[in-house]
Each structure stands twice: as structure tokens, then as C-alpha cells.
Image (tube, rainbow, N blue to C red):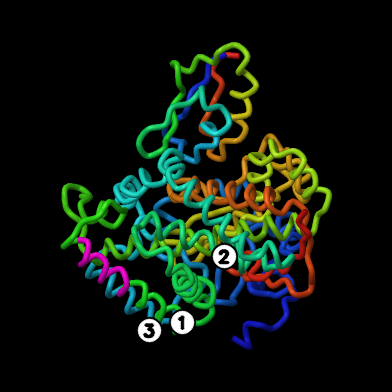
């Protein structure tokens, strides 16, 4: 870890997605890379390329099967764990379909989970989310201060996805801990990644056994009853899908809600405008997604391909920096400004192509509810200690602590 | 005005449906097709243009102005 933390001198050939200044404000680095070296490279964290231009990202997501999704995490596992993972994959098939699956295996799994996440399907959880948001505000409103990330943003996604999966929303804090163990801390700590992965796998294995005995009206039971290509899913695959559904929507959506509240706490003009003009919520949410897109994904190169002036070789890793693409001046007018009423916003916060985030409608519904309820209850708020704000970075970027104060009449 | 959704490009982001709900239908996995055979009712042309320009997959096109 220490060796990896040496300062970056040349971002084009030695970028570090965990560099503390970059994690806080990556915009300047993205601008530099896009104009000077849009496909950057690093030897850090296992070695990777990183694409930062919108058009390159569009081209790369279509390079299937040359760019494989079998290992979409940005930081690879250490060799021994990678061998274990490969052995497991040979035994059971792809680990967390559809995100780790390539065509032709990918499509039936994607089609299996998408009906759970259509706009109509996620609307069914709006009331639950609204009630939850109000309860969370109730806990802080009389204090006049709170942590918009820890006390609010962080609390919403685990409970909503738990409700959808049919697991106890009351265990939301545990689900958050597990997800951070895998996705946040686990990025640079493989032992933590393994530990929490096992905890989640075991949790779902037990639940699947229970639901096989006593089906309920929930997603797990429907996955048990489902067939892919005429065959029922084995328990390992079902728990792999549940694992994905649990972890993929937690720190990602929490990051988006948290970044939005951080933005509005620090930008009084935008905050007052949105409070005064609630009809701007739809475009404002898309603009938050564009500007603070939390997620990067990776691909594994399986056949020689070229992008820009770079030749990628089998075995290389390619990081798809969708957040950087979202500030590409070739595509977006005033890309480095937050424009709450931006009407033309083709952002790629949820990725592109066949691996487009399956939970995008859910994330949007949660952001919509979380921000509307916050603004309704606490229209005036500000950062109480800007230096106390902390950010997590790497594959998923977002604030982890956002202390705010407010007075409510 | 007439629009169409390029089926192979649509990945179900649902931006069109959010922006112009009357102009698009969604199937069971959330992929879009143009409602009403793609005919845009008078007065909804600007919404149709916005749907086109907010689709991250460039999956919607205006086939008749």
C-alpha cells in the first residue's frame, strides 16, 4: 500500500485513482488527460489503461467480446485469490451475473433481473423510501446539525434494496458494512474483500435454503423459481446474483445522494434555486448524476484492439472512466459547471452498452425521493466544517462524511 | 414529426420515457419503442427532440421533421 501511495508526477503514464487530491477533486486531472493523453496508463494497482473521452468510452463499451466483463473491478485480486476465483468460476459459471458475464451468457441474466428494475417496478418502492427518508430526517432535525452522508444518504439504499430482495431492512447497517468491506475497503485490502464476500455469500446461501422451503413474495423467491435457457439456477448462481443486487446499489447510490447534498450544502445559489423551483428536480438530478457520477468500471482485454493511438493487448485492464466522459467539452456545454436546468444531458453515469447499470431507475427514484424530502424538510443548510468532509474513491467515488448545520423554522 | 427507436442501440436507460412519456412505450425489460407508430402529436416536437438528445445510446432518431 505504501509503495502505491507515492505522489503522482505524470498522470498520463502513472495515474493513481486513490491519490487523495484526485479523490477530492478529479476534474482537473480529467481535463489534462482528455486533452493530452485521453487513454492514460499506470502500473499501479495491478496496471491498467484508463479512458477519459466520451467518444472513446462509447467505442470501448461496444468492443465485445474483445473487452471482457468477467473481472469488472478496477483493482484486481492478488494472484492466489485470482486462481481461487477462476477455479470457482469453472465449477459454477460466472460469479455475479449479469455484471461479470459476457455474451452470449450475459443476455438471459440481464433479462432475468431487468423486470425488477423498470420505472414502474421501482415506483412500487417510492412510498417505502419516502417514509424512510422522513424517519431519518426526524432523527436529526431538532438537533440543527447532522451528517448528510452518514445519517442520511448512507442509510437509504441498503434498506430499499433489502426491502426489494426480501431481507430485513433493519439490518441495513450490516449490509452497508459488508458492501464497504467488498467495494470500498476491499479495493486495497484483498483479505477484507474475501472476508466480506464470504459473509454475504453465506448470508444468501442460508436465505435461499429458507426460501426454497417457504417461498415468499420477494426477489429471492422469484430467482429460485426462474429459469435461464430452460434450466433453473443453481444456488451458487442465485447467491451470486443476490450478492450483486445487494452491493451494487449501496455505496453507488449513497455516493450520488451524498455528493448532491454536499454540492447543495456548499453552493448556496444552487440550493436556493432548487428550493424555490422544485420543478427543476428532474434536470437537477440528471446534472448531479453527470457531474458527480460515482462509478468507473473495468474490462479485461481478451484480443488485440486499438483505441485512439493505443494498442491494447490480451491481459490488459481497461478502466472506463465514465465520470470523466461526463465532463468532456466535446459533448457538454460548460462541462465544469453544474447547470441545474441543463436540458440536453447525455451523461453516461450508468455506463453504456449491454452492461448499462440495471438499477439506474432505482437509483434515480432513490435520489429523487432523498433530495425532495431533504429539501422539503431542510431547505436551508450548509457545511458546518468543510475540512471534516471525507471522500472515498477508486471504483466508486463519493463523500463519506458531510457534516451540515441548519435552522428550521 | 416522426421518430423511431433503433432497437439494437436501446439499452433501456428510460430517459426518453421520463422526458416524453406519451411518445414511448417500454417492454417488460424497460427497452423503448416509439408509441403511436412514431407519430409525434402536434405540440410535442420539442419533447421528442429532447428525448433524442438525452439518449446516452443515441438510440432515437427523427425520421420526418
Q: Which mark is residue A80?
A: 3
Mark 1 element type? helix
Real-space Cα distance between discs 2 and 3?
33 Å
Quarter of the image with the N terminus of chain A in it? bottom right
Identify whether A194 is placed above or below A363.
below
**Residue sitting nearer the eye, B9 or A360:** A360
For marks 3 and 1 on the same chain, the one whose residue lies earlier in the sequence: 3
Q: Nearer the viewer, residue B18 or A140?
A: A140
Chain to which the residue tagged by mark 2 belongs:
A
Magenta stretch: give its range.
A202-211
What residue does disc 1 label? A192
- Closer to the camera, A285 or A111? A285
The overriding secondary structure of the stretch rendered in magenta is: helix
Give residue A21's position: percent from left, percent from top: 74, 72
User: Marks 2 and 3: same chain?
Assistant: yes
Between discs 2 and 1, the one toward the N terminus? 2
**Which secondary structure, mark 3?**
helix
Is residue A208 located in the magenta-colored stretch of the structure? yes
Q: Is residue A176 magenta?
A: no
Q: Position of residue A236 (x, y in %)?
A: 25, 67
Per the image, label 2 sits on a secondary structure element best described as helix
Amino acid at each position: 500500500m505504501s509503495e502505491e501511495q507515492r505522489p503522482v508526477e505524470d498522470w498520463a503514464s502513472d495515474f493513481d485513482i486513490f491519490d487523495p487530491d484526485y479523490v477530492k477533486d478529479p476534474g482537473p486531472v480529467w481535463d489534462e488527460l482528455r486533452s493530452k493523453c485521453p487513454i492514460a496508463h499506470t502500473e499501479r494497482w495491478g496496471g491498467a489503461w484508463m479512458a477519459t473521452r466520451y467518444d472513446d468510452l462509447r467505442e470501448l463499451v461496444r468492443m465485445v467480446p474483445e473487452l471482457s466483463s468477467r473481472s469488472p473491478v478496477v483493482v484486481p485480486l492478488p494472484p492466489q485469490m485470482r486462481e481461487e476465483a477462476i477455479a470457482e468460476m469453472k465449477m459454477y459459471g460466472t460469479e455475479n451475473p449479469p455484471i461479470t458475464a459476457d455474451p452470449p451468457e450475459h443476455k438471459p441474466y440481464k433479462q432475468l433481473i431487468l423486470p425488477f428494475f423498470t420505472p414502474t417496478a421501482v415506483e412500487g418502492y417510492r412510498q417505502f423510501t419516502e417514509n424512510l427518508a422522513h424517519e431519518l430526517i426526524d432523527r436529526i432535525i431538532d438537533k440543527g446539525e447532522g451528517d448528510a452522508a452518514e445519517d442520511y444518504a448512507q442509510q437509504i439504499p441498503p434498506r430499499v434494496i433489502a426491502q426489494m430482495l426480501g431481507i430485513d431492512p433493519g439490518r441495513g447497517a450490516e449490509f452497508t458494512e459488508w458492501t464497504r468491506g467488498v467495494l470500498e475497503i476491499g479495493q486495497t485490502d484483498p483479505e477484507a474483500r474475501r472476508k466480506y464476500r464470504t459473509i454475504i455469500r453465506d448470508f444468501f446461501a442460508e436465505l435461499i435454503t429458507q426460501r426454497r422451503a417457504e417461498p415468499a413474495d420477494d426477489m429471492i423467491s422469484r430467482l429460485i423459481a426462474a429459469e435461464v435457457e430452460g434450466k433453473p439456477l443453481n444456488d451458487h448462481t442465485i447467491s451470486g446474483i443476490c450478492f450483486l443486487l445487494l452491493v451494487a446499489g449501496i455505496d453507488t447510490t449513497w455516493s450520488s445522494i451524498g455528493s448532491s447534498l454536499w454540492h447543495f450544502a456548499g453552493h448556496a445559489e444552487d440550493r436556493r434555486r432548487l428550493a424555490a423551483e422544485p420543478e427543476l428536480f428532474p434536470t437537477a438530478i440528471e446534472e448531479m448524476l453527470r457531474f458527480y457520477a460515482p462509478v468507473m468500471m473495468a474490462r479485461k482485454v481478451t484480443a488485440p484492439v486499438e483505441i485512439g493511438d493505443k494498442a491494447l493487448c490480451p491481459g490488459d485492464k481497461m478502466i472506463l472512466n465514465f465520470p470523466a466522459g461526463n465532463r468532456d467539452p466535446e459533448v457538454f456545454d460548460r462541462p465544469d459547471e453544474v447547470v441545474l436546468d441543463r436540458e440536453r444531458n447525455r451523461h453516461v453515469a450508468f455506463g453504456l452498452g449491454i452492461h448499462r447499470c440495471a438499477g439506474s431507475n432505482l437509483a434515480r427514484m432513490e435520489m429523487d425521493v432523498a433530495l425532495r424530502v431533504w429539501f422539503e424538510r431542510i431547505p436551508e443548510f450548509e457545511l458546518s466544517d468543510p475540512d471534516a468532509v471525507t471522500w472515498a474513491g477508486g471504483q466508486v467515488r463519493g463523500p463519506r462524511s458531510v457534516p451540515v448545520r441548519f435552522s428550521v423554522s | 414529426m416522426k421518430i423511431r427507436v433503433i432497437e439494437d442501440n436501446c439499452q433501456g436507460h428510460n430517459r426518453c420515457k421520463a422526458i416524453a412519456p406519451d411518445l414511448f412505450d417500454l417492454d417488460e425489460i424497460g427497452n423503448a419503442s416509439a408509441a403511436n407508430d412514431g407519430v409525434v402529436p402536434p405540440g410535442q416536437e420539442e419533447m421528442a427532440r429532447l428525448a433524442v438528445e438525452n439518449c446516452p445510446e443515441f438510440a432515437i432518431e427523427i425520421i420526418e421533421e
